[in-house]
Image: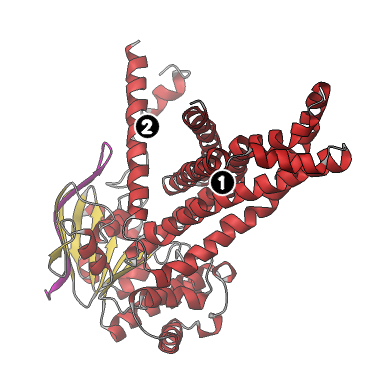
Amino acid sequence: MSQAIVEIKDVTFSRGEKTIYKNMSFSVPKGKITAIMGPSGIGKTTMLRLIGGQLKPDSGDILFEGKSIPSMTRAALYDARKNMSMLFQSGALFTDMSVFDNIAFPLREHTTLNEELIRLVVLMKLQAVGLRGARDLMPSELSGGMARRVALARAIALDPELIMYDEPFAGQDPISMGVLVKLIKSLNEVLGLSSLIVTHDVTEVLSIAEHVIIIAEQGVIGSGTAQEMLAHRSPLVQQFLQGLSDGPVPFHQPANPYEQELLSGGAV
Amino acid sequence: MINFFQKLGHKTLSRFASLGRSTSMLFGALVNMPNIRKGTPLLIRQLYMIGHQSLLIIMVSGLFIGMVLALQGYTVLVGYGAEDSLGPLVALSLLRELGPVVTALLFAGRAGSALTAEIGLMKATEQLSSLEMMAIDPLKRVIAPRFWAGFISMPLLALIFSAVAILGAHLVGVDWLGVDSGSFWSIMQAQVSFEKDILNGIIKSFVFALVVTWIALYKGYDCIPTSEGISKATTETVVHSSLAVLGFDFLLTAVMFSG
């Protein structure tokens, strides 16, 4: 495997009483599209927040470009974050700024470019996502799919090494879904960056992902190429990829036996 | 019984934890001031949103409170033939107490609740997280300008409140009820001391500004990012800051004026 941009080593993380990950390890190869999949509620977004340094693991280490994120000082962490960006599920555009200013924002904060150059960069980024015509709109005037594309343009404004996508396809109509799939793939190729997609939309992501990691039961249950995953022997992987309602992940929440509960008259 | 102590202990612990979080938030916002070139436009915008937008309610309330104060004061004073003292009565009660306190209460309702709701929604829509991921500290970018704007505008609003209220009292006392204008102003001038009354009032205002803005910002920053959480946080801002203002007012009055 080529060099890794992110390495997760023996990470354990719990929230309150609930253990989310137990000694989990995997790595995200450089320059490829990697997908992290798993049933909802498994803590996929938490994974991205751990990589971004917004949360700290209970034990284990997370390396970004070879440097340990959890043990960084605040200043070093903020420096490292300039090389990664994250596309939030909601887009998280700043609602008090226009589309143009939203994309110009990281440039104005982190670079010393003058306004003329910033204008050029913003227009180039908007052209890449096909929304140059929407530069003067406010975020409230955008549809969900457009907001996500604007957020994507903002995420690539500083030319990061790594983009993390949090559920980029959730709640999108088939057309915007297709547009996003194409964008993620072409941006990854053209800009030579690494992409990490967290999702449970199997078909979309398997069509573009070069490396797939499936998380369930507090750890990685399978990883490899899309073909390897489709041929994986684990019943859990198969249940997830084929979307079966019952299997190793049961349809029913654990509860008392059905008859007992119905006949007890609420006295359980 | 044990349950009671357990609950009490749990509550105390969570109060202290929240005090710690709020202090670290304020500390994080105030150390390493943002640079002047980027910070000034943000501060000016917040001064406009927080200070200027509160002007109308402050001035209207001031006018009416001044008028009512004059009316009530006059009916009592005239019984002793002391209606000439209406000027100092109104001025002292406004500058020492009503100006800072009522302004702080109005400010908590008008600007504090708006601050909490705005920051709570920024948190709920992941705007604060996304700032962090863009390597921009939300404490410096979002919290600090709002804190300074509140801290600067509230004492100014309190002074405007007192000034408008004194004019309102003049309107009722002198123009309507017939108190002599000369004695209204001259006795007021003779009785009001700059250090003891005006300065102490301003100090009170700064303390209230710190308390109200801090509570409003913290409640928004620490809220549970759901619609229910934000509505609860907004209510708590108004209730907690109003109570804190009244409590601090008593303490400060005891220190400043009892000696």
Number of residues whose C-alpha sits closer than 10 Å to that of mark 1, classed few (under 14), some (14–19) or many (20 or more): many
- What secondary structure is the magenta-colored segment mainly? strand
As drawn, A124 above or below A203? below
Left or right: B11 as drawn, with respect to B95? left
Residue bearing the label numbered 1: B113
- Image coords of residue A255 (percent x, y): 36, 31
Residue A182 or residue B120, whichever sits in front: B120
Q: In the rendered structure, the residue with mark 1 lies on which chain?
A: B
Distance between the alpha carbons at the discs numbered 2 and 1: 21 Å
Q: Quadrant of residue A168?
A: bottom left
Residue B83 or residue B124, whichever sits in front: B83
Asked whether B229 falls inside the magenta stretch, the response is: no
Q: Quadrant of residue B191?
A: top right
- Image coords of residue B125 (percent x, y): 47, 57
The residue most toward the top is B1
Numbered badge on residue B15: 2
What range of the chain is rendered magenta? A1-19
Numbered badge on residue B31: none
Left or right: B119 as drawn, with respect to A225? right
